[in-house]
Image (cartoon, rainbow, N blue to C red):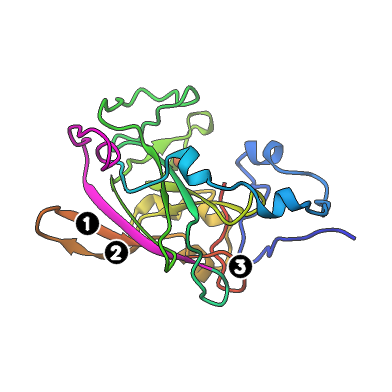
Amino acid sequence: MDYQPYDDKTQLDRQIERYPLSFTRNPSAPLIQRPLTLTERTGPVGLERELGAGPLDLSRACVEGPSRPRAVGQLISVFGRVTDEDGSPIPNAIVELWQANSAGRYIHEMDKTDSPLDPNFTGQGRLLTGPEGEFQFYSVKPGAYPVLESGWWWRPPHIHFSIFGVSWMDRYVTQIFFPGEPLNETDLLLNAVHERDARNRLIFEYDSTSMGAVNAISYRRDFVLRGHRQTPALE
Ligand SMILES: [Fe+2]
């Protein structure tokens, strides 16, 4: 029997017209369901220790690591919860994050733009969800960046999320966008999710500015990993 984990109305088109890479990055044949062994259902154990997931401040180093100057850009605080379709929290999930710096530049060999790197910003880190599935981290707002080979396409500011559940087989990857960005209207990936409600689940909610010790603009995004309120996957 064909294995079809995808809801085409609320999940990303797998092959996107005008985005040639999407045709080579996606399977052309239906997926095959493979029985899981005990290892795949239960492992790995203690991954958070091996990967060093902990409190996270991408705008500096990890908060428990050595202090560094703050990266250039608008300081943001991002928080939310990870739950299943019934609203039950997913505690101890490893959340991996990566994003461009405030000039729209990644530290990556494939980034061929001439935007400047920031010596105080790596744009990547990991954290662990708490008992209620909650998470929070600081960062700077990422800049937009051009997809050079397209000749026209600017990616709006976004943060990449990967969430590991209880086992190897539970990995969920997506990108979350910022509200009110004009480039959201033309982004090929965001708009490859056709339902407006589902698209909105890929955009942070503006929360508030918090004043005090840390002045950061605050954004919220909850993740639902299954069911009709599922957050679309966007790789
Ligand atoms: Fe990106």
Crowding near pointer 3: few (<14 within 10 Å), some, many (20+)?
Answer: some
Amino acid of disc 3: Arg
Q: Nearer the viewer, mark 3 or mark 2?
A: 3
Residue drawn at x 53%, y 29% as measured from the top left:
149
Q: Is residue 9 above or below residue 187?
A: below
**Residue 207 visible from this viewpoint:** yes
For marks 3 and 2, give the CA distance: 24 Å
Residue drawn at x 83%, y 47% as measured from the top left:
29
Contact? badges 3 and 2 (CB < 8 Å): no
Q: Is mark 2 within 8 Å of ligand 1?
A: no
Q: Secondary structure at mark 3?
A: loop
Q: Is mark 3 within 8 Å of ligand 1?
A: no
For marks 2 and 1, give the CA distance: 8 Å
Amino acid of disc 1: Ile
Amino acid of disc 2: Tyr
Crowding near pointer 1: few (<14 within 10 Å), some, many (20+)?
Answer: some
Would you say the magenta stretch is mainly helix, strand or loop?
A: loop
Q: Position of residue 188 (x, y in %)?
A: 53, 48
Q: Position of residue 51 (x, y in %)?
A: 47, 39
- According to the image, label 1 marks what residue? 217
Contact? badges 2 and 1 (CB < 8 Å): yes
Q: Position of residue 22 (x, y in %)?
A: 65, 41
Crowding near pointer 2: few (<14 within 10 Å), some, many (20+)?
Answer: some
Q: Secondary structure at mark 1?
A: strand
- According to the image, label 2 marks what residue? 206
| Residue closest to the eye, 186 or 74 | 74
Badge number at residue 187? none
Q: Position of residue 175 (x, y in %)?
A: 48, 50
| Residue closest to the eye, 176 or 154 | 176
**Left-right relation of 127 to 56:** right
- According to the image, label 3 marks what residue? 226
Give the magenta-colored segment's residue range. Answer: 59-83
